[in-house]
């Protein structure tokens, strides 16, 4: 792929919405990582279709970025196009008072916003999303969960655009069964963009919904650190907790460069000022090694690591 030619064609389709060599730290909760070669911000379906036509012709590496809360890009950057949804993809559609309690949300909607909007409307069942710092699109792709619930429990369908598909085959609506949702898993690919999703809820008193939201927020502040992190680094192994295993292995406070295992929650790794993506990646590897040595359990990262230094791109 010629980045210059690709970027020129893309800029013609998306005037003022394409930038080159954007530091990934500006797009992620870790605030580290090298430059993304091309960044495209898309505000509506027509723009996304235009992007897809250019991408399908040049076939660059693709990185769909939501809230950047589960991503680590290498210090060498990402030699492709990063896609960020905005505008109409940030909308939430709530049901009329006499309609079934289903909520439609754009792929770029932050999950805490979805939880609060639904709660305010007296739609119960989506409160757990307030504790997840990702987007609707990321929730579908990762089957995000917390507080005893997962996206699969409330998701009805998702509308997806495959940037590498041709014409009429590009857009599809997938049911829960078609998405193959499992623990932090779906069949949503790197070239798929989740543009919207529909969720099932139930009617309840808005005050009761708000109280549940507030309790989750209180719990999160008490048990999870703020600052530059990406939430849980490792998936929980069957019947156990990754955080418990890391803590039991004596690794709270373990530091590699500017990255450190949180003292507040052992499955959260903080990136201090001046940290690099390599520091975080080396800490992930070191914790894996020490936990395996101490417990015999091989932890599997939930964190997605891409770009130069991680995947050879």
Image (cartoon, rainbow, N blue to C red):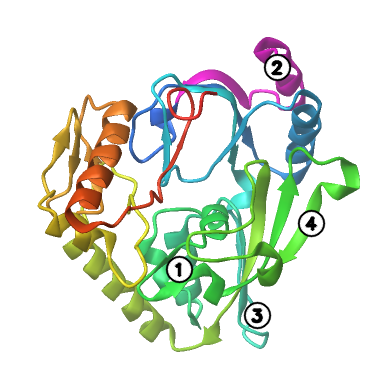
Disc 3 + disc 2, Cβ < 8 Å: no
Q: CA distance from mark 1 to mark 4?
A: 25 Å
**Residue 127 shows in this picture:** no
From the viewer's side, name the closer residue of 83 and 116: 83
Q: Earlier in the sequence, mark 4 or mark 3?
A: 3
Q: CA distance from mark 4 to mark 3?
A: 26 Å
Mark 2 Cα shell of 10 Å, populated few (<14), some (14-19), many (≥20) = few
Mark nearest the camera among 4 and 2 is 2
Which residue is under mark 1? 115
Q: CA distance from mark 2 to mark 1?
A: 41 Å
Q: Is residue 294 above or below residue 100?
A: above
Q: Is residue 203 above or below residue 58?
A: below
Q: Secondary structure at mark 4?
A: strand
Q: CA distance from mark 3 to mark 1?
A: 17 Å
Q: Secondary structure at mark 2?
A: loop
Residue range of the region highlighted in magenta in the rendering:
1-23
Q: Quadrant of residue 100?
A: bottom right
The reply, left or right, for residue 290 in relation to residue 77 is: left
Q: Quadrant of the C terminus?
A: top right
Q: Residue at x 25, y 43 (%)?
A: 289
Q: Earlier in the sequence, mark 3 or mark 2?
A: 2
Q: Earlier in the sequence, mark 2 or mark 1?
A: 2
Q: Residue at x 29, y 69 (%)?
A: 240
Q: Earlier in the sequence, mark 4 or mark 2?
A: 2
Mark 3 Cα shell of 10 Å, populated few (<14), some (14-19), many (≥20) = few
Give the numbered dot on residue 70.
none
Which residue is under mark 4? 172
Mark nearest the camera among 2 and 1 is 2
Q: CA distance from mark 3 to mark 2?
A: 48 Å
Which residue is under mark 3? 96
Q: Is residue 4 magenta?
A: yes
């Amino acid at each position: 792929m010629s980045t210059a030619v690709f970027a020129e064609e893309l800029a013609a389709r998306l005037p003022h919405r394409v930038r080159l060599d954007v530091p990934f730290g500006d797009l992620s909760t870790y605030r580290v990582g090298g430059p993304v070669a091309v960044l495209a911000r898309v505000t509506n379906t027509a723009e996304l279709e235009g992007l897809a036509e250019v991408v399908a012709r040049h076939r660059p590496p693709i990185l769909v970025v939501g809230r950047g809360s589960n991503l680590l890009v290498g210090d060498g950057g990402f030699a492709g196009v990063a896609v960020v949804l905005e505008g109409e993809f940030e909308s939430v559609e709530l049901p009329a008072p006499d309609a079934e309690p289903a909520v439609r949300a754009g792929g770029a909607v932050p999950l805490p916003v979805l939880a609060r909007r639904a709660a305010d409307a007296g739609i119960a069942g989506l409160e757990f999303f307030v504790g997840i710092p990702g987007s609707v699109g990321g929730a579908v792709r990762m089957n995000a969960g917390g507080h005893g619930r997962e996206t699969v429990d409330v998701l009805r369908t998702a509308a997806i655009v495959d940037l590498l598909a041709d014409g009429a085959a590009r857009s599809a609506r997938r049911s829960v069964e078609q998405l193959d949702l499992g623990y932090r898993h779906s069949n949503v690919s790197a070239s798929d963009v989740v543009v919207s999703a529909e969720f099932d809820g139930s009617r309840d008193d808005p005050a009761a919904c708000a109280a549940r939201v507030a309790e989750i927020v209180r719990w999160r502040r008490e048990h999870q650190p703020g600052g530059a992190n990406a939430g849980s680094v490792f998936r929980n192994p069957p019947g156990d907790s990754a955080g418990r295993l890391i803590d039991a292995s004596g690794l709270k406070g373990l530091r590699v460069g500017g990255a450190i295992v949180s003292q507040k929650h052992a499955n959260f790794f903080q990136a201090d000022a001046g940290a690099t993506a390599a520091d975080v990646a080396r800490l992930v590897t070191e914790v894996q090694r020490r936990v395996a040595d101490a417990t015999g359990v091989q932890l599997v990262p939930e964190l997605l690591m891409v770009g130069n230094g991680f995947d050879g791109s």
